Image (tube, grey):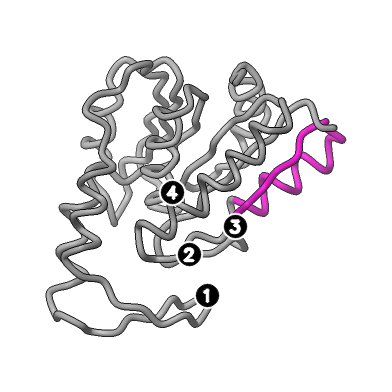
Amino acid sequence: MPNAIFIYLHGFLSSPRSTKAQQLVQFIQSQNLPIDCRVPELLEEPHLALAAAEKVIAQARAENSVVGLIGSSMGGFYATVLAERYGVRAVLINPSVLPHLRFQDYIHDRGAEMVNPHSGRRFTLGERDIATLAAMVPEKLVQPENYWLLVQTGDEVLDYRDAVAYYAGSKQTIEAGGDHQFQGFGRYLPELVKFLQLSIV
């Protein structure tokens, strides 16, 4: 049985095959760490994405292991929701903050079909999805010390300052330049492992 289970939550219109997810898995394997890394597929509809993530964290908790979350972009939002619910630690990479406000951009054409470029899955988003996201937002971060925020100021998708303000009181790494992918993520993997292994369920 692994000493720890890390759950990586990918971003919107991404997939479990994302570069950062694979970097994490390969690092854990290369170091022969007693950690099981799980990367669930998060469908685009918020209620389905959170249900998939919550199923994996429930399985991990049942195994009585240390549980740590890593979330990128939209996955960072879901990681925050779950970290608040279960009191575990999370590393957030250029996370989405208050995503229900941004989802308005995706439903300006009501009923317009979208396609995930990685999976080829077709879907639509609507007002119900925005309401679902809004209901997920934690009223406040009960334990800001459970989070490590990684942002780059060159993020072309999200304003890094929103995350810096939202996660005030958390461990923060703010790098000049970079982009939404967070260049050089691999540099932080050893420290990430140490941070998350303190996350006892």
Q: Is residue 173 magenta?
A: no
User: Which corner quadrant holds the N terminus?
Assistant: top right
Question: Circle 4 sits on which residue?
Answer: 75
Question: Circle 1 sits on which residue?
Answer: 118
Q: Is residue 27 magenta?
A: yes
What is the three-letter code of the residue carrying label 2? Ser
Q: Secondary structure at mark 3?
A: helix
Label 4 or label 3, whichever lies nearer to me, is 4
Question: Circle 2 sits on which residue?
Answer: 14
Q: x, y percentage for residue 99?
A: 24, 50
| Disc nearer the start of the sequence (3/2) | 2
Q: Secondary structure at mark 2?
A: loop
Instruction: Work out whether residue 179 can be spotted.
Output: no
| Disc nearer the start of the sequence (4/3) | 3
What is the three-letter code of the residue carrying label 4? Gly
Q: Callout 2: 10 Å neighbours few (<14), some, many (20+)?
A: many
User: Which corner quadrant holds the C terminus?
Assistant: top right
Q: CA distance from mark 3 to mark 2?
A: 10 Å
| Disc nearer the start of the sequence (4/2) | 2
Image position of 31 with respect to 64: above or below: below
Q: x, y percentage for residue 195?
A: 59, 21
Does the residue at mark 4 contact the one at mark 3 (Cβ under 8 Å)? Answer: no
Q: CA distance from mark 2 to mark 1?
A: 6 Å
Q: CA distance from mark 4 to mark 3?
A: 14 Å
Magenta region: 21-40
Q: x, y percentage for residue 93?
A: 44, 41
